[in-house]
Image: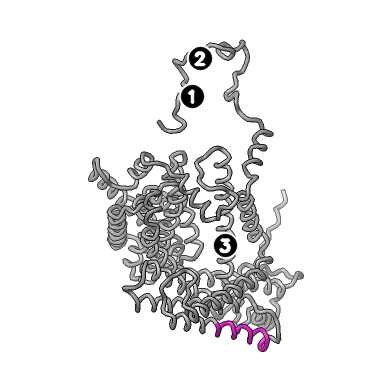
Amino acid sequence: MKPGDSSDDATPETGATPASGADANPPTGAIPSLRSDAPTVGASALDLARALANPVALRGIGSLLAGSAVLLMPTLTVGLLQLLVVLTLLGSTALDFVFALTGRSRFGARKRRSLVLLRGLVSLAFLMFMVAEITVLRDGGRLSVELLIGLAGVYVAVRAAITLAVTLVRWKDTSHRAVRIAGAVVAAALGVLAAVTTAALIDAVIVGAAVVAMLLGVILIAWSIRRADGGDTAVEPVDATVVAIVWDWIRGSDIGRTDRADAAEGLYFEEPDRYGKLGAWWVMLVLSVGIATYAVLADSTAVVIGAMLVAPLMIPILGLAGALVNGWSRRAAHSTLTVALGVAVAVLLSYGLAAWAPVAVAMDSNSQIVSRISPNTVDMLIAVAAGAAGAFATVDKRVSSSIAGVAIAVALVPPLAVVGVSLANDRPDAAWGAFLLFLTNFVAIVLSAAAVFVLTGFARQKVLRRNPWGVIGTIAPYAALGAVILVPLMFTSQGLVARSSDQRDAQIVVDDWLGEDTDLLLQAVTVGDGEVTVLLIGSDQVPAAAELQTALQTELRRNVSVRIVVTPVEVIEIPASGS
């Protein structure tokens, strides 16, 4: 019997005979209490205070407050970030030289001392360059955050290349090869981003660290409340590490074999009636692709939302994430094959429908196409949240109705429809952009859903305990693919931020140029690659264009041409005729 289904909690509406006693026959007109044992507000607050009166809860509260402070007060993070990067680089350099000289590794791993010495020399070179930059180039000034992160990115990329080379050279003697290669790819991608898109990456790192700190704080607080309620805990809060607490939370969250089987039944097409389930899935996929394709051709947002609701592609993706964390290799292979075949069929079908559609597609003005061919980091963040929500709704049936909202939040079939439509209109660049959006959603959903499946107890404890490196190894390729995908997304995001900033600055300059004593109305300001277009309405005298160009070049810090378009206003008045 499942929790919550016991006879003590059941309250049938008819046919129930209350037991004899004071509450069996309440006085006429009296309103019976639904929960006579419901705690008061004061008692609930006291119980919560007792539950949080332990070191683990205090650490969780501190982590939650620290993450919140970083998000709400970003200026305090700059100095801490500088100090953290410098100390990390110093510590890594010292440990590399210690191992190169003594042969003692901090983790006991087998490494070639000559390669570690080379890595230490590279670290030392970066440190010396930083010191020279501070003392000589900047006359003792503090190292800027942008330069610091850029240097750290180059350093991380070089170290990742060395690690990858060591793994390939000592292939047979290296353990956990998939994890090491994936880690090197992730580090190299992050290093490239740090070196090239420094400003955008700083914000991403700060926000990501703050969110992780807040989530960790929530887990620590929830563990303390579970312990106070008599939950299954195996560690003492006095001397427990954060890793031990998180693992104990995962162990205590196990949903059990029965509930795991119930959840898996909706994720995998298995007996009984396996082919009936597969047939229904393919029918819904084909219909959703048809709806999405015609919605894109008609540039209809409402119909695209309908296609999202019908599309079943989320199911095998969540199934893949669940199979990865449970060690179900056969289910993982079937889910991957289902997704791959579904993607191929969706692209081919949308291509055929678009090729025969009796409508002309305006590729540059169709909002359904334009919004899906330039994905950025925001799209990845949306997919991460949607994947986590979908995984949680899969495990907890009380919120399973929210899966429709998840389908709307993350687009899976519409980008594939845009791929087919773009190919049918000889636009491979647009097709690649839309397919990159699908890949972004796919990888982000797999990674976030896998994390939620572990934290909510859907992953089998036996597998996580006996073969943790095997589970990490199966997820590592998707993490590496996500890091590679993040590179073009970050470049796109940086371009959008730069254009938005230029647009705002240019509009301020134009407002100042026009002044307050004018009848000219500013209609729009457009900033292109080398030109700024200003649209004005009115009959007043236009100020000197050369002054506007000088101000714009000073503000935008580059040479631009200026194009001013003035639309005259003609007013015709006819007086009322006399009666």
Give the prevailing secondary structure in the magenta stretch: helix
Q: Residues within 10 Å of mark 2 (few under 14, many from 20)?
A: few
Q: Which mark's residue is nearer the viewer, 2 or 1?
A: 1
329 with respect to 48 (left or right)? left
The kind of residue on which mark 2 rests is Pro
Q: Earlier in the sequence, mark 1 or mark 3?
A: 1
Q: CA distance from mark 3 to mark 2?
A: 55 Å
Q: Which residue is mark 2?
A: 18
Q: CA distance from mark 1 to mark 3?
A: 45 Å
457 with respect to 68 (left or right)? left
The percent position of residue 536, horizontal first and vertical second, equals 64, 71
| Residue found 47% across the figure and 20% down from its top | 13
Residue 8, which numbered label? Answer: 1
Quarter of the figure that contains the N terminus: top left
The percent position of residue 189, horizontal first and vertical second, equals 46, 73
The kind of residue on which mark 3 rests is Ala
The percent position of residue 126, horizontal first and vertical second, equals 56, 83
Residue 209, which numbered label? Answer: 3
The percent position of residue 17, horizontal first and vertical second, equals 48, 13
Q: Which residues are magenta?
A: 124-137
Helix, strand or loop at label 3? It is helix
Q: Is 113 rendered above or below residue 539?
A: below
Q: Nearer the viewer, residue 536 or 95?
A: 95
Q: Earlier in the sequence, mark 3 or mark 2?
A: 2
Q: Earlier in the sequence, mark 2 or mark 1?
A: 1
Rendered image quadrant of residue 204: bottom right
Q: Which mark's residue is nearer the viewer, 1 or 3?
A: 1
Q: Is residue 517 magenta?
A: no
